[in-house]
Amino acid sequence: MNSIARIALLFLLLALISGCAKKTLVALVPDPDGKTGSISVESAGGSVTIDTSYQATTLGDAKTQPSAPVQMAKETLDTIFKEALSVQPKQPLHFLLYFRQDTTLTPESAKLLPNIIATIQERNSNDISVIGHTDTLGSKEYNTTLSKDRASAVKKQLIKQGAEATAIRTTSHGKENPLIPTADNVSEPRNRRVEVVVR
């Protein structure tokens, strides 16, 4: 074999190796809330649907059908996609605080305030939403004011425990968005709440 043929063969081998290395891995993982949807991977050669958590397919050139799905370990996918996962924004964390009446937190909810502060500090968050709600007992106007007062009371508590005032945005829904749907003028403890969202 002459040197030109050897060089041509070397380039051919390199091209084949490069071609193998350029396959795309597509994997399906659960949403942050644990739900799994489905994904369809298509090329001119065909398509494959994945609807099971931690299954994956590989896709070569545009004319080749994606490979049959294979089950992969979560740890393996975490390692492969480590760099991409590291730049993903953290999912918002939600806390529900309940009230006895008016603007007095239940003892259980009051105990959650240090956890909320710890989360804010850990994330160095400057985007905190505090959303007030009421049950359906009383007039619309009364509950609009009460839900604002509840949100303000929680904001004050968070600031008192170390959160930055400028990082907290308060809104209120009155009795318009109950957690537990009820008829009008119904006392429902689970609807007397403030939701704190830390991003």
Image: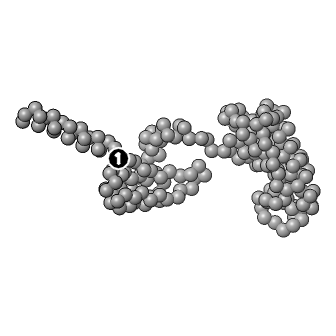
Side of 17 relative to 57 (left or right) = left
Please identify the residue farthest to the bottom as the structure is shown: 183
Dividing the image into 4 quarters, which one contains the C terminus? top right
Q: Is residue 72 above or below residue 187?
A: above
Side of 176 relative to 79 (left or right) = right
Q: Which residue is mark 1?
A: 23
Give residue 27's position: percent from left, percent from top. 44, 50
Please identify the residue farthest to the front as the structure is shown: 4
Give residue 47's position: percent from left, percent from top. 38, 61
Quadrant of the rendered image containing residue 1: top left
Q: Residue at x 82, y 60 (%)?
A: 176
Q: Residue at x 47, y 46 (%)?
A: 74
Front-most of residues 108 and 147: 147
Give residue 115's position: percent from left, percent from top. 73, 38
Secondary element at tag 1 = loop
Side of 66 relative to 163 (left or right) = left
Badge 1: residue crowd in 10 Å (few <14, some 14–19, many ≥20): some
Please identify the residue farthest to the left as the structure is shown: 1
Side of 113 relative to 68 (left or right) = right
Quadrant of the rendered image containing residue 113: top right
The colour scheme used to paint the residues is one colour
Q: Is residue 74 visible?
A: yes
Q: Residue at x 47, y 58 (%)?
A: 39
Q: Amino acid at mark 1?
A: Lys
Q: Is residue 184 above or below residue 6?
A: below
Q: Is residue 162 above or below residue 95?
A: above
Q: Residue at x 92, y 61 (%)?
A: 139
